[in-house]
Structures are given as structure tokens and as C-alpha cells.
């Protein structure tokens, strides 16, 4: 049995919010013309979601709450939650939070941006190394 502090907490809408944030951050990092690697993207989504779930409660609950507030905050600007917006609308909402005078909003976007990019490009690197080993092995 898992200890209570590592028990998975369920928050409706969290998967969609995390997935859309990851996809948007990776797309920005790669540039519009590059195609994202679906397996690396799936692993990145799963890793980000797992990290949120594994954070200590005093960090995890506020971060999950901020993620859901960010997602549903899109309704105020575009009439749709972040995960249902177009790519252009998502970029606009992210830019609003990046340029905010409220430090937490800026830090929230910075967290997702750095973690999503790091995890995605790490996964790409790992997949390339696996393919190289298979070819040379």
C-alpha cells in the first residue's frame, strides 16, 4: 500500500490542462514548422503530470490549483479554457501571464516552460540513443 503522502490525487481537467501546456511549450521551443515526436510528447505529458502528483502537498496542491485556474482562466479572455483554445489563443494567454506584474503568474509559466522543454528534449535524446544502439548493436 502506498503511503498517504504519495497517493495519487485526482483532479478533473488536470490531464487536459497539463497536456495543452506541454504541447504549447514544446511547439514554441521547436518552432512552428517542426513536427513534434509523438512518443516523446506523450512521455513528457506523463512525466509532468506525475511530477505534479508527487510533489509534497504544500507545493503540489497549490501548483495543481494554479494549473486548473490557468486553464479555466482562458474563459475570461477567449471564452474557452486553455486546453480548448487555438494555438494562437494559447500563445496569447501565455504571453499575458509571462508579462504579468504578479510574480507567481510569471513563475508558473516559467516552471512549465522549463520543465516541459527539458523533459521533451531529454526524451528525444534518449530515443535517438536507443535507435543508435539498435542500429550499431
Image: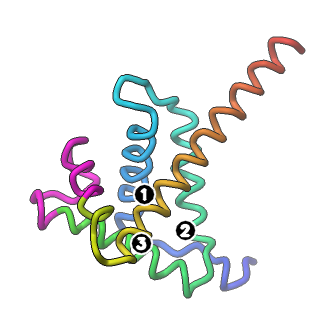
Position of the N terminus by quadrant: bottom right
Circle 2 packing at 10 Å, graded few (<14), some (14-19), many (20+), is many
Outermost residue toward the top in this view: 135
CA–CA distance between discs 3 and 1? Answer: 11 Å
Mark sitting earlier along the chain (1/2): 1
Q: Secondary structure at mark 3?
A: loop
Residue indicated by mark 1: 18
Mark sitting earlier along the chain (3/2): 3
Circle 3 packing at 10 Å, graded few (<14), some (14-19), many (20+), is few
Does residue 58 lie above or below 76 as drawn? below
- Along the line of sight, the residue nearer the viewer: 12 or 91: 91
Residue indicated by mark 3: 11
Q: Say whether residue 47 is magenta.
A: no
Circle 1 packing at 10 Å, graded few (<14), some (14-19), many (20+), is many
Residue indicated by mark 2: 52
CA–CA distance between discs 3 and 2? Answer: 11 Å
User: Residue 116: x, y in percent?
Assistant: 52, 51
Q: Are marks 1 and 2 in contact (CB under 8 Å)?
A: yes
Part of the protein shown in magenta: 75-95
CA–CA distance between discs 1 and 2? Answer: 9 Å
Q: Residue at x 26, y 48 (%)?
A: 91
Q: Examine the residues drawn in magenta and state their main secondary structure.
A: helix
Amino acid at each position: 500500500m502506498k503511503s498517504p503522502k504519495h497517493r495519487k490525487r485526482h483532479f478533473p481537467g488536470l490531464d487536459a490542462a497539463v497536456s495543452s501546456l506541454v504541447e504549447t511549450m514544446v511547439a514554441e521551443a521547436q518552432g512552428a514548422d517542426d513536427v513534434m515526436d509523438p512518443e516523446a510528447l506523450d512521455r513528457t505529458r506523463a512525466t509532468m503530470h506525475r511530477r505534479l502528483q508527487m510533489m509534497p502537498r504544500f507545493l503540489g496542491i497549490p501548483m495543481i490549483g494554479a494549473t486548473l485556474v490557468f486553464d479555466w482562466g482562458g474563459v475570461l479572455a477567449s471564452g474557452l479554457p486553455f486546453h480548448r483554445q487555438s494555438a494562437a489563443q494559447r500563445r496569447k494567454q501565455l504571453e499575458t501571464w509571462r508579462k504579468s506584474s504578479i510574480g507567481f503568474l510569471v513563475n508558473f509559466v516559467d516552471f512549465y516552460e522549463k520543465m516541459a522543454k527539458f523533459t521533451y528534449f531529454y526524451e528525444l535524446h534518449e530515443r535517438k540513443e536507443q535507435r543508435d544502439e539498435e542500429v550499431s548493436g
